[in-house]
Amino acid sequence: MIKKRSFWISLCLVNLCLVAFFGFTLRSKILFPLSFLDYRNVLSAHSHFAFAGWAGLALMTLLIYDLLPGTLSEKKIYQWILGGIEVSSLGMAFTFPFYGYNAASIFFSTLYIFVAFVFAFVFFKDVKRTNYPFVLKLLSISAVSSLLLSFLGTLGLVYILGSRSNDAILYRDSIYVFLHFQYNGFFTLSVFSLLLNYLVKKGIGIDKSARLFSVFLFLSVAPALFLSLLWHNNSLFYILAAIGCVLILIGLYYFLLFFRNLQKVQVFSSGLAGTFWLFAALSFALKMLLNVGTIFPQLGNEVYGDRPVIIGFLHLIFLGFLSFYILFTLIEDGYFSREGKVIAFPFLVFSTGIIANEFFLMVQGLGILFKTNSKAFPWLLWGAAILLFTGSVAIAISRLAAMQSENKKL
């Protein structure tokens, strides 16, 4: 089981390098006349591969090998599932940049959805067979359910492409449904199911604040969707969004209690892992507050109408929350250790790139709002993309070096 987990995790880190390379290419396309590249096609490759090849594969791997007992995670079908996720992800990565939406890229996108449904079917059955605490089952099952619900947005986009419709409302709604159930559902619920499972394995257990936080986090997912749909100016949507905000705030309160309680206990084996957990927790809290803030029409309209702010918010969750958490888990599990030590430099470069990317995107967004935008921002964001790509490659190399060190001991 350990070797299989190690293989898929190592592959995820290679995929992260490719995601960062696509991001660097997009930033380069803005600055340089790369006429042989179509920006929209590369953007499609970047987003699809980030969701499938990095986030999807990493979370499914961790859910299988960390959450499920060894007798269940050893089932051969999980190897086929993860293999199918990787094949479909690479297929999207190497078709979208050159062809955009065509038969090949749509085939690999459809394959990913099909494999995800197979994963959900098998995973649900196995989780139900465990004797885990209620909140662990609640978070893990609702996380994977959210992944499936996000494909409703994909279905809307497929309809638009197939019918060649110009329905801008359906297009916008489809995008928001997909993003909401991926970011606020699949990513967020998976992370906290894995964290609580980690605490159980460490013998710390799940305290009352963690249980209540989990319940309110789960309850907030469905009504919080309507925070993204307030532009419809529908009274019912405002009521549901307000309910979502209340649930988010209650959940955030219990999260802060949970976070405070964790700080009192010696949970993490290394300072670097603890730092990454801190960054992930802060990113999550900020994400929750920003979600609530969008219920105010003026702020919500400015945010959803401001491209740098939207990109910054999405990257806050994807990089600041999800990627920091995954790397925290891998550091804690010793995936980068050589003779008991972890070289911090690759992680310093990558985390600096994340922080710089977020800072410049948010300042650029404010600059557009206050008419103080500068031509320097594309260059600054290009620099941040270089740091992210360099850092991701250095992290993958660090993992390779750790594997070689492990093999020498055998």
Image: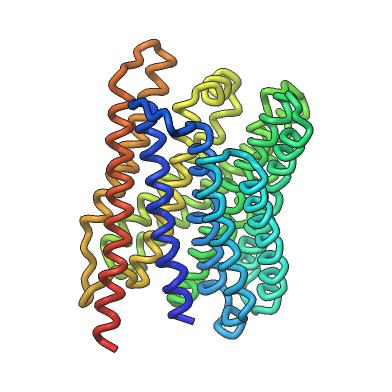
Q: x, y (%) of residue 319?
A: 42, 46
> What residue is shown at x 52% (from left), y 74% (from top)?
65
Residue 188 visible in the shown view: no
Check the image and report above or below for 70 versus 15: below
Q: Quadrant of the C terminus?
A: bottom left
> What residue is shown at x 65% (from left), y 78% (from top)?
130
* Occupied quadrant, residue 112: bottom right
Residue 252 visible in the shown view: yes
Check the image and report above or below for 216 versus 366: below
- Considering every residue shown, the one lying at the far top of the view is 371
Q: x, y (%) of residue 83?
A: 56, 68
Q: x, y (%) of residue 50?
A: 49, 49
> What residue is shown at x 60% (from left), y 65% (from top)?
84
Q: x, y (%) of residue 255?
A: 50, 52
> What residue is shown at x 28% (from left), y 29% (from top)?
380
Looking at the picture, tell me which residue is in the foreground, 25 or 377.
Answer: 25
